[in-house]
Image (spheres, rainbow, N blue to C red):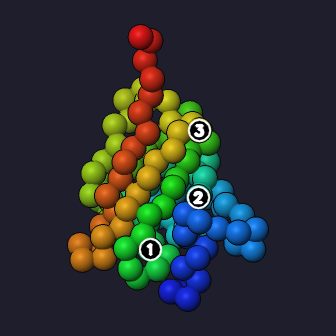
Amino acid sequence: MSDLDFQNISTVQSILQPQPVTFTAAATIAPTTFVSFIAGTTALAQITPPVTGAHMLAIIATSTNWSGCVTTGNIIVASITNSTVWNNKLNLFVYNPITAKYYPNYATVATNV
């Protein structure tokens, strides 16, 4: 994606932007829209930045047994994968172009209160 297409990953969009993409879970993904879905179990290690500057991505897993994220790529903090239910939970990733790393805010699972 070109930096000229930055609006495709903006948090404010119109109906002219592409619809969210669903990826098969893999070690590396290359989002082209602000919201992306992941289906499968493979842990995510690397996100190919869609633009060169600071930006945010929303990634939602559609599988209950997704392995989450690891730090072997450009994600600075791993997710906790022990018995966490990931499906339909929003995970935000903020990119810092200085460190070339994504700083995640992982979804949490509500427990019985």
The mark lying in front, picked from 2 and 1, is: 2
- In the displayed structure, 91 sits above or below 47; it is above
- Specify the label residue 35 is tagged with: 2
Residue pictured at 55% horizontal, 63% vertical: 11
* Between 26 and 51, the one nearer to me in the picture: 51
* Between 55 and 84, the one nearer to me in the picture: 55
Quarter holding the C terminus is top left
- Specify the label residue 88 is tagged with: 3
**Amino acid found under the numbered disc labelled 1:** Pro
Quickly name the residue at label 1: 49
**Amino acid found under the numbered disc labelled 2:** Val
Q: Judge left or right: residue 94 versus residue 21.
A: left
Q: Earlier in the sequence, mark 3 or mark 2?
A: 2
**Amino acid found under the numbered disc labelled 3:** Asn
SS at mark 2 in the image: strand
Q: Judge left or right: residue 110 versus residue 88.
A: left
Q: Are marks 2 and 1 in contact (CB under 8 Å)?
A: no
SS at mark 1 in the image: loop
Residue pictured at 60% horizontal, 53% vertical: 37
Q: Residues within 10 Å of mark 3 (few under 14, many from 20)?
A: some
- In the displayed structure, 38 sits above or below 96; it is above
Q: Residues within 10 Å of mark 1 (few under 14, many from 20)?
A: many
* Residue farthest along the top direction in this orientation: 113
Q: Residues within 10 Å of mark 2 (few under 14, many from 20)?
A: many
